[in-house]
Image (cartoon, helix red, strand yellow):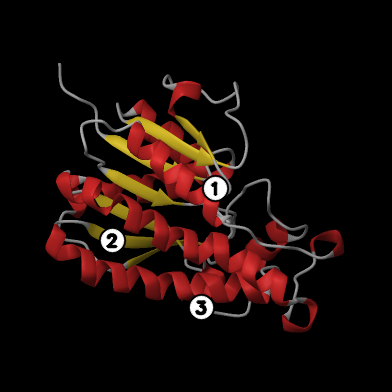
Amino acid sequence: MAVPQTLVLTGASRGIGHATARAFAENGWRVITVSRQAFSPRCPWASGPQDHVQCDLGDAASLAEGIAAIRDRLPAGRLDALVNNAAISPKGAGGTRLGVLDSDRDAWLGVFSVNIFAVALLARGLIDLLSAAQGAIVNVTSIAGSRVHPYAGAAYACSKAALLTLTREMAAEFAPRGVRVNAISPGEIDTAILSPGSAAFAEREVPMRRLGRPEEVADGIRFLCGPQASYVNGTELHINGGQHV
């Protein structure tokens, strides 16, 4: 019996992460999920709680424990894909964006600890397992990383711009080890974290005149982790209905 390919996915509890976990599980992958929350019994993939690692990506000690727990679940010493989807985006009252003047030092550190530092440290902690499998890393950036966005705050936007730079750095550094690193940049995707007014914004500003579906982003992630993308490295795939043009 063939050993299934294995994915480690952060931020799997809802939205894009949940759709990604479902898509990989339905295609025969083993999915190890990482989240601050306990495993939800509503999640449909078969491996369930035993393949869920509960840790706070923004806390250095908890993250180190989480990396050790992931490694314990991979005794064969191989990991086929790491998808860094977890991110935080603080909002003001009523879902308003937080600008530079609204964000103190703790807010900046909190965002960057999850959205940037954890991505680098997860890769550092799992690189030997990814290399053994000639695997792939996909980082989830955002259209907010390339322009001022009406809903995404300054710290979040800066972290996503930095994540694209980190993607390029890792792509160049890890390719000799046989590990490809790419990013996907979603636009306005229909998830629970959307700010009020996002649907109307998409109808005005997105050429396709609609919100994207989480499943459409998950399909892009699967492509970048699969053999069809075997010579794709260091790129950012825009999934936004043409919003970036």
For mark 3, give the secondary structure.
Answer: loop
Q: CA separation, marks 1 and 3?
A: 31 Å
How busy is the neighbourhood of tag 2: few (under 14 within 10 Å), some, or many (20 plus)? Answer: many
Image height check: is 190 above or below 38? below
- At 73% from the left edge and 58% from the top edge, which residue is drawn? 195
The N terminus appears in which quarter of the rendering?
top left
Helix, strand or loop status at disc 1: helix
Task: Using residue 197 as the reference point, say whether residue 185 is left or right of it.
Answer: left
- Viewer-nearest of discs 1 and 2: 1
The dot on residue 181 is: 2
What is the quadrant of residue 108 in the picture?
Answer: bottom right
How far apart in space, not on screen, are marks 1 and 2 (Cα)? Answer: 25 Å
Residue 198's disc is none
Q: Position of residue 237 (x, y in %)?
A: 36, 63
Q: Which residue is mark 1?
A: 62
Which residue is identified by label 3?
146
Sequence-wise, which precedes: disc 1 or disc 3?
Answer: 1
Whether residue 138 is visible, yes or no, is yes
- Tell me: 124 left or right of 232: right
Of tags 1 and 3, the one toward the viewer is 1
In the displayed orientation, state which residue is furthest to the right.
Answer: 93
